[in-house]
Image: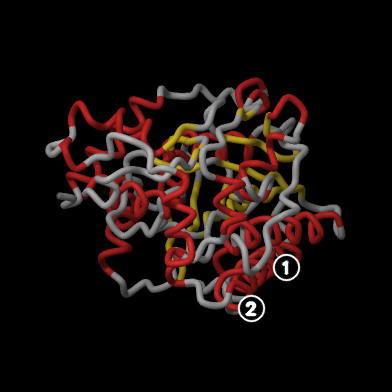
Amino acid sequence: MSTALVTGGTGFIGIYVIKLLLERGDRVHTTVRDLKDQKKCQPLLSLQNAYPGKLHLFQADLLKEGSFAQAMQGCDIVHHVASPFLVPQQIKDGMKDIVEPAIKGTQNVLNTANETESVKRIVLTSSIAAMYGDSADILHYYNATLTESHWNTTSTTTSSAYSYSKVAAEREAWKICHAQSRWDLIAINPGLVIGRSLTPASASGSLHMLGAMYKGDNKMGAPELHYPIADVREVAEAHVRAGVDAAAKGRYIVASERSVSQLEMANLVRPYHKKPDVLPKKNLPKVMIYLAGPFMGVSMKWVSRNIGIGYKVDNRRSVEELGIVYRSKAETMRDHYNAWVEAGGK
């Protein structure tokens, strides 16, 4: 039986990791930003009741040095899932608003691990955004396929600040890891994480994006952006297995083998959407996105390098080494939509 710390316990991925660990019989420590926030903490309190004495909650702030020390005491595995999140419209200064907090949060958690003798392994939630900047980048990779060997070298703080924050934070994690020898590091690099949420308080970017589509924000047409999707349950399973499998190492892509467009996602949901007419029935012409780009905060270069470009993903390591069995996209989209409806989506 292990004792694991899960940062970001109220998050979309974090609470699934906690649930799987508890089902395994492990002891779990988790951190939240505010223990007084009943809405966010309620799902965790329910798990506490279901697994008496197994789940312990602590308050911690990613940006506050030393705030994870108490929660990490006695833990041999750390699942660092927490990450600063802002929707693009909230990012005014890429470096200040999202890049620096992402790096600082990684430093705080991993430096605390350096001071906690019990820690033997850290499993980090990164992203495929740490592996490429624009979709066009992947077209130049071998076989036009994204693999764990790739790193994002094109995003900047002013262009795709979120993606830049992911690669900067993961590189910082590997730097800290390589400077010591007591604990090892594994990175989980998921695609667009969707599926059924266990907490109504989640601020996941995928929930925000797809919720807008379900409500009809893309009724006139969807921008032809492509994403390799990952079911949140697969991401959590990868986290847990990477934490306990002694042979696990390096980076693991957790995502579908082929990227899908927003229109494809809409078509998967259409058969059971309560108001299917609000879903997009076509892709927006690229020329329209070029014209609207300046008002949406995206450049012509970004449009040319991302709109209409699909790609392949090599997820074999997650299948062969971690034993991940990927659900169908239809199942994941159905579960995601049903959870949105149950949470009050209209």
Q: Is the residue 63 above or below the residue 225 in the image?
A: below
Between 100 and 156, the one nearer to me in the picture: 156
**Residue 281 point in image, percent of width and height:** 28, 34
Real-space Cα separation, disc 1 to disc 2, in angstroms:
9 Å
Q: Which residue, given by chain and number where applicable, does mark 2 sit on?
A: 65
Disc 1 vs disc 2: Cβ atoms closer than 8 Å? yes
Between 319 and 55, the one nearer to me in the picture: 319
**Residue 25 point in image, percent of width and height:** 47, 38
Q: Residue at x 40, y 41 (%)?
A: 194
Q: Residue at x 61, y 70 (%)?
A: 69
Image quadrant occupied by the N terminus = top right
**Residue 273 point in image, percent of width and height:** 18, 35
Residue 30 in view (yes/no): yes
Q: Earlier in the sequence, mark 1 or mark 2?
A: 2
Q: Is residue 223 left or right of residue 116?
A: left
> Mark 1: which amino acid?
Asn
Q: Is residue 288 left or right of residue 128?
A: left
Residue 111 numbered mark, or none = 1
